[in-house]
Amino acid sequence: MFKAARSLTFKCVKCSKAVQVYLQKTSACSHIQPYQGLCQCGELKRHATGDKDAVQSYLESPVGSWSHHH
């Protein structure tokens, strides 16, 4: 079974520094693996892998309001 990485690194869109995002707690399913992290400049970075619709829902939701349901 595929195991999601605990953290990923991206370039910040605001300051171009490296920002690390961490796997968020979710239900025990493989539909989505949401990540979130805060850059040193204060810019929030969100990322997700998995089901296309679930990823889109996560990225478009207001911060802190998204939850995954079956």
Image (spheres, helix red, strand yellow):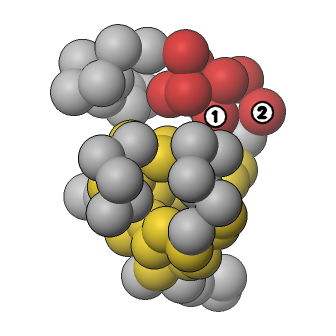
Quadrant of residue 13 within the rendered picture: top right
Residue 40, given in percent of the width and then of the height, sits at 32, 63
Residue beneath label 2, please?
A: 52
Residue beneath label 1, please?
A: 55
Q: Nearer the viewer, residue 2 or 64?
A: 64
Residue at left 64%, top 34%?
55
Residue at left 50%, top 28%?
58
Q: Which mark is residue 40?
A: none
Residue 64 sits above or below residue 57 on the image:
below
Q: Crowding at label 1, few (<14), some or many (≥20) Cα neighbours within 10 Å?
A: some
Left or right: 64 in relation to 70: left
Let me know if residue 31 appears in the view: no
What amino acid is labelled 2 in the image? Lys
What amino acid is labelled 1 in the image? Val
Residue 54, given in percent of the width and then of the height, sits at 61, 29
Residue 69, given in percent of the width and then of the height, sits at 36, 27
Instruction: Find numbered disc 1 in the image and state the secondary structure of the residue it sits on.
Output: helix
